[in-house]
Amino acid sequence: MRRWFIFGVILALTLPLFTPGVHVGTAHAYTGTAWTAEYFSNPFLSGPPIHVRLDSQIAFDWGGDSPVPAIVPPDNFSVRWTGGQQFSAGTYTFYATVDDGVRVFVDDIPVIDAWYNQPRTTHTGQITLTEGSHWVRVEYYDAGDQAVIFVRWLPANALTAPGGWAAEYYNNTNLQAPQAGGRLEEVIDYNWGSGSPIPGTINTDNFSARWWGFPEMEGGTYTFIAGADDGVRVYVDDALVIDAWSPSPYQEYRGTITVNPGIHTVRVEYFEIGDQARITVYWIREGAGIPSTGTVGASTVTATVAARALNVRTGPGITWPIMTRVYEFETYTVIGRNAAGTWYQISGPGFTGWVSGRYIRFNGDPSGLPITDGSGGGTGTPSGVLLAQSNASLRIRRGPGTNHSRIAALQRGETATVIGRTADSTWLQIRRDDGLVGWVSAAYVTLIGDVPLASIPVTG
């Protein structure tokens, strides 16, 4: 009797997953990058902003607190986010979850207009876009009590597991028992940053997860898309569709599989080893109206710039001279790498030079590229420059001290140029190769170069 009772409970929980005729679920795959955020001390976006910063995504649940303590009030404030975002050609659904008002524009065309007081509510809107960069503007206000805003978008006919995913979490990077946490989740679309998937239960670093979904598919060929920082694998009925099981900055991977009509088992595996944690998974049925984005030949590797502006240097390291700059969303052919796989040689109109692998996204496998630096992967000898090399995954802050907000990270082993310091030299002002300037604690870096720290100007 007990066995039948357990079976009945499992059946009740899984019935929603197998509802006939349900093929499209909600997947929130894209949150944009590099948003310029302007914060106002009133709910009308009026007057000059009292605080401006760069937000990596629009995903905030401030509750009853201020978005910028001691600067922006906790109630009756407003925010405007703007940024050029890259799209493939097609129709997109935008999602905005807010408490209170929100407006979303693409190229000044209104997509969502919900400019009124409301409890936490999700609004949607659709727009058809051409290939390329489009200017997205999000406007928000909070009238009091709770302050919430999440904005994301995805192809209008993206698919995921209707009914949700059974999630398993482990406090190690190899899915090794015992399981440390689990829950039912609506979608696989998370950007935990440097946080934990389940605070107090799952590690902030060095964890792994497995999701199980049981979608009903119409049959045919499907393209699966998985974006991850760090590793991800996707299986359909135990067939490996995506295999990217190695540490990596956020990249998107694709794989295709042909299936018969019916219910299928989709298994997603993920691990995070340090610094940023992010995962998103969905799929598209070929012939369902999604325009082709093109493919790259197996022997060609290209790199898309993932920083607003990226220095191209004459050699593989930040001590080599800058020869030109490339810009976000531009794509170049990759023709070589250093032995460490941290710097890549790209070819563009009128130049061939080196860029840091941290700030590019690959289309193709870069591991088979020839080693073209001629020295086994060195980063150059510092001369007249003082470098700070991170000894850990290190937070870059807006000012010199832990009371200043985090704006980015310096990964273990990554170097940046020291351009300033505090009077006691406990905090260093650094400039990354993508031009970002911030502060790091001197306790967690190794100084490299022939320049004495005392000669660096005091800037904070």
Image: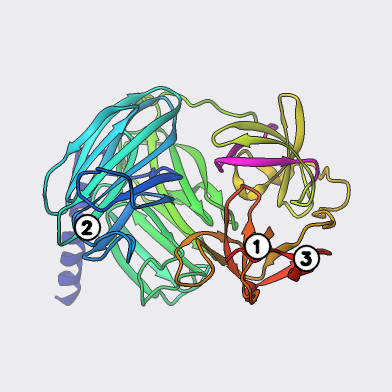
- Residue 203 appears in which quarter of the rendering? bottom left
Q: Which mark is residue 147?
A: 2
Residue pointed to by mark 1: 420
**Circle 2 sits in a helix, a strand or a loop, which is it?**
strand
Query: Which callout, 3 or 2, points at the residue further toward the start of the chain?
Result: 2
Q: Is residue 240 above or below residue 460?
A: above
Answer few, some or many: residues within 10 Å of disc 1's Cα (few below 14, many 20 plus, some between 14 and 19): many
Amino acid type, label 1: Gly
Q: Residues within 10 Å of mark 2 (few under 14, many from 20)?
A: many
Q: Residue at x 70, y 65 (%)?
A: 389
Magenta highlight on residue 391: no
Q: Which mark is residue 135?
A: none
Question: In this rendering, which labeled residue sits more in front, label 2 or label 1?
Answer: 1
Q: Tell me, yes or no, if residue 161 can be seen here.
A: yes
Q: Is residue 440 left or right of residue 217?
A: right
Q: Nearer the viewer, residue 72 or 335?
A: 72
Name which residue type carries label 3: Ile
Read off the residue under disc 3.
448
Q: Is residue 25 visible?
A: no
**CA distance separating discs 2 and 1:** 37 Å
Query: What quarter of the picture does the C terminus occupy?
Result: bottom right
Q: Amino acid at mark 2?
A: Ala
Q: Earlier in the sequence, mark 2 or mark 1?
A: 2
Q: Secondary structure at mark 3?
A: strand
Residue drawn at the location 22% of the way across and 38% of the way down: 124
* x and y, in percent, of residue 433 in the image: 66, 49
Residue 146: horizontal and vertical position, in percent? 18, 60
Query: Is 421 placed above or below 301 here?
Result: below
Q: Which residues are magenta?
A: 298-315
